[in-house]
């Protein structure tokens, strides 16, 4: 499939390749400026030696930016100026694309927004005080809307740029400069499902709706005693990405001796439910048991029970991006952000979702399993709730990096130097979880953070607090991270890994995932499935 896709797309690629590189150069150039500024601030000159070209390019830019004195502002994590600059970089790229496609109106709209941004930035620079939320928000919102529009109109190219952008962000992260806002952009790109996946979904949904015999099979599964049998090995995956989940399940069963003893518990959302059911019923997964549920059916998970559901339903939390795109009146992905984000938080409700289970292995949808995972179930967690690999080999994965420790509630209870750990492959002892009321602890911290003053986005910080003192470190070969942003992971480390994790924005199902790691994922997707073949060639 991959080869065919490449042939099919070759002509446009060649046509655009020249300016793609020009754009990439431009992006690199701008971001190199930021990296340099931040590095300089942190006195981390050692790292610079590794990127001599970046440094040279950055030098000129730095002098240009000193005039605006954004040095200080853009290095703080809450900087609106930085967010605007990020958006401007993208918007500029889209102007070129839009012009290339004779979409002059869009180009004009983008250009005029960029001018407004520049005006705002220079205003803030002149009065020598940071940009406020009130000033920046309307512009950030309307620019996001436009960027979405542009992305929709010029999808493939947009993917290119967005992934390039996130690639650069990976460099930034290494330079200790990743901020909530800047990664948010890359995240959006990573989460947007490629068009051919959308096509597969629609075809599967059609067969789900027309083929009643599929329903019989799933009805059977629903009532299967295997779902609650604690002598079997239970895995859970929560996702809206069909092929990703399929690759997770397939790689898990392909690397175990007794696939029939494996039970997968998948939770997705309403728009993807039919397609997932149809896929898992109609493909061969070596006799493992696969249950698919949808989060909309969990009526107990409502705003009165869960502060996170409450928060997700409050419109102002849904964010700039989602609100902005409502005007566009399309992009089904963004119509129902509540459940999409809720899928990310389901990991904190596993004992409630599966009241009869005692132990599960939780897998993110962007992992590939390469070894037998059943020994995880007999590991001694020493009474802990969560088994996970620690991530503090590098300084910035310690607690102080994730939280606002000026808050006394936090600083009195947690060690800022405590080691972080990763979601993606976790062994959960659900009995210990229920005994320790971890879900209550999670709710407590979500409520404490209702104003966002303890941490910003994501599920990891909440997890670090909820499982604090209840996490058992696993040997790190169980779970090797970084395949979604780090191009330099040692081959031996990857080969030795039981699970590889494509965390980061360069997901293997995106056209511009890191080429070296893509085959690890692709070998677990049935490339000859008629729907896949159909959707790629049409
Ligand atoms: C920029 O701002 C920083 C901090 O506010 C200040 O120390 C520095 O002198 C300023 N630089 C210029 C060139 O104005
Ligand atoms: C499957 O179960 C649902 C309700 O649980 C029922 O409405 C439906 O008719 C069943 N379908 C088949 C084909 O058995
Ligand atoms: C909300 O959830 C609680 C338990 O979690 C349940 O008792 C209640 O009936 C639910 N409310 C609705 C409207 O479903
Ligand atoms: C968990 O909650 C129950 C009931 O709310 C309580 O009796 C128990 O003491 C709690 N356990 C812990 C470890 O906090
Ligand atoms: C960090 O916590 C302090 C104390 O609660 C609060 O005043 C401050 O606004 C917080 N910082 C951020 C960025 O939320
Ligand atoms: C599962 O992976 C195997 C390779 O290990 C592949 O041959 C097969 O087609 C995959 N199945 C599906 C449903 O993708
Ligand atoms: C891949 O899919 C095709 C079509 O559904 C099927 O005939 C074939 O057996 C599958 N291959 C594997 C290895 O599952």
Image (tube, rainbow, N blue to C red):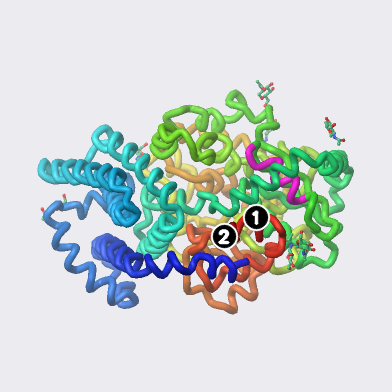
Mark 1 Cα shell of 10 Å, populated few (<14), some (14-19), many (≥20): many
Residue 422 picture quarter: bottom right
Q: Which residue is drawn at 56% across and 40% down?
A: 340
Q: Magenta stretch: dominant SS? A: helix
Instruction: In the rendered view, tell whether residue 396 sits above or below residue 241.
Output: below
Range covered by the magenta-colored residues: 271-280
Q: Name the residue under label 1.
A: 243
Q: Which of 344 and 410 is in front in this view?
A: 344
**97 up-or-down from 404: above or below:** below
Task: Name the residue that disc number 2 marks.
Answer: 509
Q: Is residue 380 left or right of residue 195?
A: right
Q: Where is residue 376 in the image (x, y as percent from the top left)?
A: 74, 61
Q: Can residue 360 be seen in this view?
A: no
Q: Marks 2 and 1: CB-CB under 8 Å?
A: yes
Quadrant where the image shows the C terminus? bottom right
- Residue 50 covered by magenta stretch: no
């Amino acid at each position: 499939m991959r080869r065919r896709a490449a042939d099919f797309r070759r002509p446009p690629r060649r046509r655009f390749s020249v300016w793609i590189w020009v754009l990439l150069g431009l992006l690199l150039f701008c971001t190199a400026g930021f990296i340099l500024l931040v590095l300089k601030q942190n006195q981390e000159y050692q790292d610079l030696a590794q990127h001599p070209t970046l440094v040279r390019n950055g030098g000129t830019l730095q002098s240009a930016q000193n005039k605006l004195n954004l040095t200080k502002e853009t290095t703080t994590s809450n900087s609106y100026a930085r967010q605007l600059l990020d958006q401007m970089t993208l918007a500029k790229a889209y102007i070129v694309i839009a012009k290339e496609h004779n979409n002059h109106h869009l180009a004009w709209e983008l250009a005029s927004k960029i001018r407004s941004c520049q005006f705002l930035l220079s205003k803030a620079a002149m009065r020598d005080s940071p940009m406020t939320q009130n000033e920046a928000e309307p512009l950030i919102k309307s620019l996001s809307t436009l960027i979405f529009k542009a992305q929709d109109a010029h999808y493939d190219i947009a993917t290119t740029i967005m992934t390039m952008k996130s690639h650069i962000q990976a460099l930034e992260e290494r330079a200790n400069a990743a901020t909530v806002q800047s990664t948010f952009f890359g995240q959006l790109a990573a989460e947007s499902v490629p068009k051919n996946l959308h096509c597969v979904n629609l075809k599967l949904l059609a067969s789900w709706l027309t083929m009643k015999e599929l329903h019989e099979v799933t009805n059977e599964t629903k009532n299967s005693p295997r779902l609650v049998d604690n002598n079997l090995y239970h895995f859970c995956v929560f996702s809206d990405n069909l092929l990703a989940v399929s690759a997770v399940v397939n790689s898990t069963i392909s690397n175990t001796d007794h696939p029939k003893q494996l039970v997968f518990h998948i939770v997705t959302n309403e728009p993807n439910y039919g397609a997932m059911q149809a896929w898992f019923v109609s493909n061969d997964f070596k006799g493992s048991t696969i249950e698919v549920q949808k989060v909309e059916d969990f009526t107990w998970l409502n705003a009165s029970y869960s502060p996170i559901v409450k928060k997700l339903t409050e419109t102002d939390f849904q964010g700039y991006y989602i609100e902005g795109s409502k005007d566009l009146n399309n992009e089904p992905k963004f119509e129902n952000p509540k459940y999409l984000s809720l899928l990310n938080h389901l990991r904190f409700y596993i004992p409630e979702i599966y009241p009869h289970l005692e132990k599960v292995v939780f897998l993110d949808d962007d992992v590939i399993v390469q070894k037998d995972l059943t020994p995880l179930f007999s590991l001694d967690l020493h009474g802990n709730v969560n088994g996970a690999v620690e991530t503090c080999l590098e300084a910035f994965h310690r607690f102080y990096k994730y939280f606002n420790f000026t808050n006394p509630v936090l600083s009195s209870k947690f060690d800022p130097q405590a080691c972080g750990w990763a979601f993606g492959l976790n062994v959960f002892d659900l009995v210990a979880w229920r005994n320790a009321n971890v879900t209550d602890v999670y709710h407590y911290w979500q409520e404490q953070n209702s104003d966002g003053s303890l941490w910003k986005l994501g599920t990891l910080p909440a997890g670090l607090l909820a499982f604090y003192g209840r996490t058992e470190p696993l040997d790190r070969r169980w779970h090797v991270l970084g395949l979604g942003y780090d191009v330099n992971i040692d081959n031996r480390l990857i080969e030795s890994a039981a699970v590889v994790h494509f965390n980061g924005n360069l997901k293997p199902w995106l056209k511009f995932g890191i080429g070296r790691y893509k085959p690890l994922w692709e070998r677990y997707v049935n490339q000859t499935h008629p729907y896949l073949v159909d959707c790629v060639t049409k």
